[in-house]
Amino acid sequence: MKLSLQDVVKRFGAHTVIDRVSLELDDIHCLALIGPSGGGKSTLLRIVVGLEYPSAGGVALNGRPIEYHDEALLRHRRSIGTVFQAFNLFPHLTALRNITLPLEKVHGRTPDEARELAEGTLRRFQLLDHAHKRPAELSGGQRQRVAIARAIAIKPQVVLLDEPTSALDPEMTAEVLELIEEIKREGRDLLLVTHEMGFARRLADRVALLADGRIAELGPPEQIFGAPQSDVTKGFLRRVLRY
Amino acid sequence: MIESWRDLVLAPGGARGEASPPALAKALNILLALLLLIGAVWLSLLKLSYNWNWESVWDHRAELFLGWLMTLGVTGVALVLSTVGGFVLALFQRSFVLPLRYFAKVVVEIVRCSPLLVLILLFWYGFGGVFQVGNEYRYVAGILILTLFESTYISEIMRAGIESVGQTQIESARAIGFTRAQTYRYVIIPQATRQVLPPLVGQLVSLIKDSSLLSYIAIQEFTFSAQQVNSNTYSTLETYLPLAVGYLVLTIPISLWSRWLERRFKYET
């Protein structure tokens, strides 16, 4: 994955959430965004996925600049997989239908193709037994795994995950993290906002720490977690790793 | 289970009334309430020594029945039209085209704040008179006025239903790559329907009741027929009691149906 941000700014009214963030990354497979709440991680991810317009600046993913107007963004969003913290799935549809619906309506697959693809993905994730359940009948971990299945059923090159385990208890967190590791192994590039420091350390090949809308530090996980340079990073890690 | 007389007249859980009473106690007490009601009316009429004259009304039964059927027809057509109208108004109210949005908001506000009878008089005698709408359009006009009135209420019901679908669901639909129309079709409408259905069915009760006001512009629905029968026979209670019962036969089952839908959708999430 190639990601380039140039002086990206995002303001909500008078409040600046992202303050001239720039970075150039080439040939990485997993970028983890960490940092304190309200630091701008999720907003930055939402700009990259095309759910939010930047107030200024430019973004390019895999060499292609993202055009920030409705039609281009729709195409852009269709090309990547996205998983949110919670409430990804449509509660009125079964797990299977949640996956086949976008395949049919957005990606033009026939119902048979969509079904085959969806069942294949669910089988691989050991979720086939739950294919005909609605989200309310699934555990939180199962719901997130189905959401991930939906995101990768379209075979995207890049998958964006916004705190995918924040709403889960530790046991369910583990089953979801395992799955994320697996989709990385199969060659998909990840952009991950997370509070799981151990996971970021193990999975990411670059970690960026965002605080107050700026990148406080960017580097390989060994540097960020082993020998942080910036005081902001040191302070943040001291706080989150104390317990 | 009913073990003593207390179980028949007292709600389980006492004043807090947490659980619903056993079916037998419920039926018994509803019957008791009805008997009290009918008994009170009956006794007061006995005191007045009212002379019942059912025969003359019975002779006009066909007229009453035709009026009842007309009420059914008028409400049926108005229901379909005002559901469509309400949906369109609800969409307009959420439109990003501002003239449409404010047009819908202004119409909904004005109509909802006006009495139906005033609208009927204004549109039929007022506008209808000025534009010289022919008498043959009386029924069309009546149905359209009723439709306009109910559409505004239904649009508010639907707007609330659409807004009950969480922002996260819409976000999720956008992330998948659904267009705006697809988001409505596959995400918002199916989820809003379960919110909207019970109050929408409840609104049908209002529609049936409101249609009686069309008698003011001589549309020969149930109320109008009853008034005609009354003026021919001079037997007021004998016409107006069946009139009330004729409406209740329609409205009570629909009202119960609405409550049932509400319970059903509340339990399954």
Image (cartoon, coloured by chain):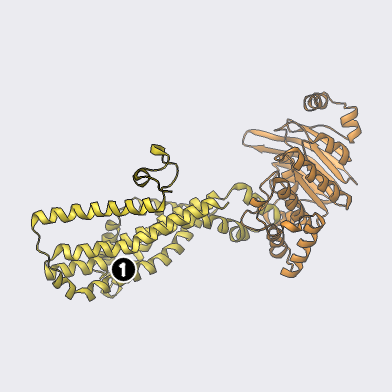
Count the numbered circles shown.
1
Residue at image location 31% in from the left, 60% down from the top: B209
Is residue B93 among what the camera can see? no
- Closer to the camera, B248 or B49? B49
Q: Position of residue A232 (x, y in %)?
A: 80, 25
**In what element is the residue under mark 1?**
helix
Q: Which sits in the foreground, B43 or A148?
A: B43
Q: Residue at (74%, 70%) from the top-left corner?
A: A112
Question: Which percent across, then down, holds residue B261?
Answer: 47, 57
Q: Nearer the viewer, residue B127 or B31?
A: B31
Q: What colour is chain B?
A: yellow
Indicate the position of residue B121 as horizontal and vertical percent values: 26, 60
Q: Residue flagged by tag 1: what amino acid is it?
A: Thr
- Report the residue at 88% width, 35% height from top: A221
Question: Counting other residues with Cα less than 10 Å from the Cα at mark 1, is it few (<14), some (14-19), or many (20 or more)?
Answer: many
Residue B150 located left or right of residue A224: left
Q: Is residue B123 shown above or below A172?
A: below
Residue denoted by label 1: B71
Say whether residue A167 is left or right of residue A126.
left
Residue B199 occupies quadrant: bottom left
Question: Is A202 positioned to the left or the right of A167 in the image?
Answer: right
Q: Name the tint of chain A in the rendering.
A: orange
Please determine whether, in this image, residue B129 is positioned above or below residue A32.
Answer: below
Residue B28 on image: x %, y % = 33, 53
Residue A12 lies left or right of residue A44; in this view the side is left
